[in-house]
Image (cartoon, rainbow, N blue to C red):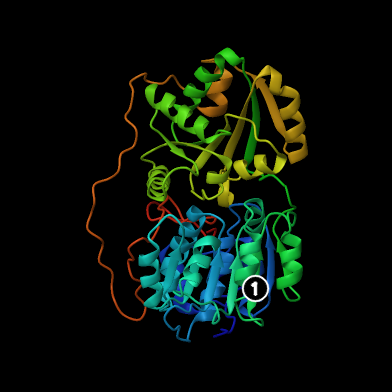
Amino acid sequence: MSDPATTGPADTFAGLGLPPLLVQSLNREKITAPFPIQAAAIPDILAGRDVLGRGPTGSGKTLAFGLPMLVRLKGAPSTPGRPRGLVLAPTRELAAQIEKALDESALSLGLRLACVVGGLPIKAQAQRLARGVDLLVATPGRMADLIAQGAASLADVRVTTIDEADHMAELGFLSQVTTLLDQTAKDGQRLLFSATLDGGVDDLVRDYLHDPVTHATAPVGASVATMEHHLLHVRKADKWVVLAEIASRSGKTLLFVRTKHGVDRVAEELRAAGVVAGALHGDKTQSNRTRTLAAFADGDTPVLVATDVAARGIHVDGIDLVVHVDPPAEAKDYLHRAGRTARAGESGTVVTLVTDDQRAEVAALTAKAGVDVIGVEVRPGAPELVTLTGAREPTGVPVPPPSAPAPTAPKERATGPGARDRRPGATTVRSGGRRGSGAGAHGHRNRGGR
């Protein structure tokens, strides 16, 4: 593994020790200045240290671990089915976006990158691994399946990242994670990123990280300074009309609903009112989830209705309003939902629709979350509603549900040592930017906050 010398100011990627080819690739993507978590973590990861990273969503952790991982893997070959770097992510959507965020950087260094997740053909993923992969991004279940089939081995893995470890714990994946970690090199480098250390994450740190250096960009549970929080007190009889007006606004809007059935019902009712809305939850097929998220990221579907679990994989730039249609169950759920906006230095607004019977519950929840929240009474068409959310009356002209796009021929890609195959079954999500953990292909990409 290579370990480049540091050149240039410490507030640049070159100054952090990244090689010129990689810095040039970042510059082409308009990513020129590292975010705090990147400036803190990259030198330690390049030096081979185990790192525990703690920071709010949108702080740029994907590049913080991904770029130095690629540099550490540069210059040594990987054999078929035996990657040398591994990133474990809790959701399919997050894994896909990590892959997309690191795609161009990997190509610039002549490295092969791939993503394997559930819900897509495992045979195609096994074939991709057989062609050789340097850095593999995976969900724990699919990684275990590929190993069980003899299509993959982790014996050569020298650098492993566990991303969103707290969410791994919430989904019950930690036992799978530890089983996979036990199959990597005992003296390998381990990187772990988590918003909190509860739910067994602290045990994971203690058992698998060796003398880790900790980097935190904000206190756990802190709200983003560029984010506004409001409680919209509504009568039950007005709640639907108010929601339809909010969803009719201009811009990307993310709506949180407690149940999968509720997600489908809200999306259907919004479409009947004339709002182009998509639905995202765990019962959707992977192809549907990928298509729905891509349409939201590209702006073709400006409103996305989602459950908590599905939305944890949403890392899309440009979401300027998050709406708690149903108040979350816990304070940490509030923060996770809210973290989908105000990413990577952008501003955003979070509103919670609160009926009379929910006031005490929501007041206690937001206090526990540590957010400075403002409550206001709103009715349909109220000026305060328009000022806070940009609400406007829906057209009332029904729109059809999203349909599957017509098949298109795969794009050609350059071949050679640095070229990455366009794999059957690969998952990619395009968004309007490349900050935070998200990945994009369109629009202006600013700084280093991927």
The image quadrant of residue 366 is: top right
Horizontal side of 126 relative to 377 (left or right) equals: left
Disc 1 residue crowd, few under 14, some 14–19, many 20+, Cα 10 Å? many
Q: Position of residue 440 (x, y in %)?
A: 42, 55
Q: Position of residue 121 (x, y in %)?
A: 37, 60
Looking at the image, the residue that sits furthest to the front is 149
Can residue 249 be seen by looking at this rendering? Answer: no
Where 295 sits versus 374, above or below? below
Residue receiving disc 1: 190
Q: Position of residue 161 (x, y in %)?
A: 60, 68
- Of residue 198 and residue 367, the one placed in the foreground of this image is 198
Looking at the image, the residue that sits furthest to the top is 237
Tag 1 secondary structure: strand
Q: Residue at x 50, y 70 (%)?
A: 148
Please state the total of marks drawn on the protein image: 1
Q: Residue at x 53, y 67 (%)?
A: 144
Where 386 sits versus 59, above or below? above
Q: Residue at x 55, y 62 (%)?
A: 140
Can residue 227 be seen by looking at this rendering? Answer: yes
Q: Can you say which quadrant of the picture contains the N terminus?
A: bottom right
The amino acid on which the numbered mark 1 sits, given as a three-letter code, is Arg
